[in-house]
Image: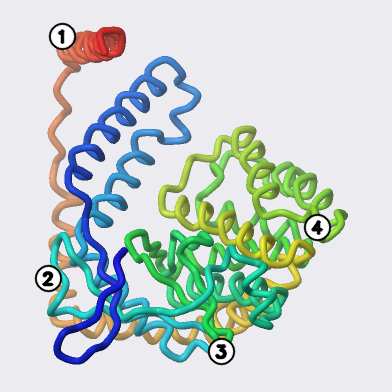
């Protein structure tokens, strides 16, 4: 990132330039990760529920977006539009005519790095307020907008002279759909209220836990996760600790990795670390409670049901003229005779197995040569 000044207006800007060779280095690294994921799935079948190949594919897509500054400029513009009315928060806007695939230009953001506690104290800012604001802003963006900064570490945050928090570097952004937001909020809300039965029900309703598992046993396991944490001193209450305990529970109940939640969970841990770096005694549950309660009030219950029905009616109205034909085609497909499936091709399965072994052996050979 370089500081510059526009020749025509004198406006200060930040210019980000893609380093030469970075795409080639990334491709080499991602190929190694894919090989590792394939190896894990091959030698440890129990790890397949964690979907290592899907996880690597997810992060490949994320990082590929980070290597194209046109996409990052678009992310910055969308994030700025979403958060324009957020008090105490600021996002530099892109200068489009000076941005491209390998160069991005943003308005310059002057401020103190959020990791410099001494400078923050010297400037007269209250670190407790800043710590709470960082956490609440993240939750607001994730729940309200479904679009959040997924790389909110201290190096990407500043505090302005007036106390506003400034975010930059928008290469990694997270997006979650409305249904997932409701599930996420209900899980958080259930933990905050210690309603472990409801947390368990939400997991089953969302399909996160296989339907053949015992919901009462799962609720009991969740209680064993939540109660020790809520009994801790504020300095020891940790979202990272909660996620670590939950990971142990997922293995017991056969839960699979949800790739759509990976960035969200990762960012939760990072943001908690930023907030705790500003205020070591922050109680993340107390800070999160008003944001989650507000979202639940607006999006879970009668109001949400009416909105959902209205959306459904609008969709039905768009497809109204086509519905009779669609129903007729569906009924015809149901009544048609289905051809018998062909007998299994044993040679094909044998070939696939042999190919997997050859790939694995080649990977090991390459590793020893390199």
Nearest to N terminus: mark 1 or mark 2: 2
Judge by depth and name the residue closer to the eye, 325 or 245: 245
Image spot of residue 33 (x, y percent): 33, 31
Q: Mark 3 points at which residue?
A: 162
How far separated are the C-alphas under marks 3 and 4? 28 Å
Q: Mark 2 points at which residue?
A: 325
Q: Where, by quadrant of the figure, is residue 128 drawn?
A: bottom right
Q: Name the residue under label 4.
A: 235
Q: How crowded is mark 3: few (under 14 residues within 10 Å), some or many (20 or more)?
A: few
Q: Name the residue under label 1.
A: 347
Q: Do the residues labelled 3 and 4 touch (CB within 8 Å)?
A: no
Q: Residues within 10 Å of mark 4 (few under 14, many from 20)?
A: few
Secondary structure found at label 1: helix
Q: Quadrant of the C terminus?
A: top left
Nearest to N terminus: mark 2 or mark 3: 3
In this view, the mark in front (2 or 3): 3
- Say if 78 sits above or below 356 in the image: below
The structure's colour scheme is rainbow
Q: Quadrant of the N terminus?
A: bottom left
Nearest to N terminus: mark 2 or mark 4: 4
In this view, the mark in front (3 or 1): 3
Secondary structure found at label 4: helix
**Would you say 5 lies left or right of 241 here?**
left
Q: Where, by quadrant of the figure, is residue 56 drawn?
A: top left
How far separated are the C-alphas under marks 3 and 1? 71 Å
Give the residue drawn at x 34%, y 46%.
59
How far separated are the C-alphas under marks 1 and 4? 60 Å
Image spot of residue 122 (x, y percent): 67, 77
- Say if 61 sits above or below 158 in the image: above
Judge by depth and name the residue closer to the eye, 136 or 339: 136
């Amino acid at each position: 990132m370089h500081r510059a000044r526009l020749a025509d207006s004198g406006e200060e800007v930040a210019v980000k330039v893609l380093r030469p060779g970075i795409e080639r280095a990334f491709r080499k690294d991602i190929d190694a990760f894919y090989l590792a994921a394939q190896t894990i799935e091959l030698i440890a079948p129990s790890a397949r529920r964690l979907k290592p190949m899907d996880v690597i594919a997810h992060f490949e897509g994320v990082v590929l977006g980070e290597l194209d500054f046109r996409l990052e400029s678009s992310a910055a513009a969308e994030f700025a539009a979403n958060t324009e009315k957020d008090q105490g928060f600021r996002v530099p806007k892109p200068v489009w005519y000076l941005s491209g695939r390998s160069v991005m230009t943003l308005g310059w953001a002057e401020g103190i790095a959020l990791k410099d506690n001494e400078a923050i104290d010297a400037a007269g800012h209250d670190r407790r307020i800043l710590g709470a604001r960082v956490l609440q802003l993240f939750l607001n963006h994730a729940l309200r907008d479904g679009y959040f900064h997924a790389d909110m570490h201290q190096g990407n945050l500043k505090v302005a002279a007036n106390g506003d928090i400034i975010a930059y570097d928008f290469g990694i952004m997270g997006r979650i759909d409305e249904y997932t937001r409701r599930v996420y909020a209900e899980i958080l809300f259930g933990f905050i209220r210690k309603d472990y039965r409801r947390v368990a029900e939400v997991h089953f309703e969302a399909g996160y836990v296989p339907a053949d598992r015992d919901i009462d046993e799962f609720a009991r396991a969740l209680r064993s996760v939540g109660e020790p944490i809520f009994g801790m001193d504020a300095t020891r209450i940790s979202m990272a600790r909660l996620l670590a305990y939950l990971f142990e529970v997922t293995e017991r109940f056969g839960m699979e990795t949800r790739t759509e939640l990976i960035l969200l969970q990762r960012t939760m841990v990072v943001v908690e670390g930023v907030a705790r770096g500003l205020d070591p005694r922050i109680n993340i549950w107390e800070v999160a409670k008003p944001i989650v309660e507000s979202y639940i009030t607006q999006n879970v219950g009668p109001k949400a049901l009416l909105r959902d029905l209205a959306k459904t009616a609008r969709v039905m109205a768009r497809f109204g003229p086509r519905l009779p034909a669609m129903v007729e085609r569906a009924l015809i497909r149901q009544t048609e005779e289905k051809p018998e499936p062909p007998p299994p091709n044993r040679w094909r399965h044998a070939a696939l197995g042999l190919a997997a072994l050859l790939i694995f052996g080649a990977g090991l050979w390459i590793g020893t040569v390199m």
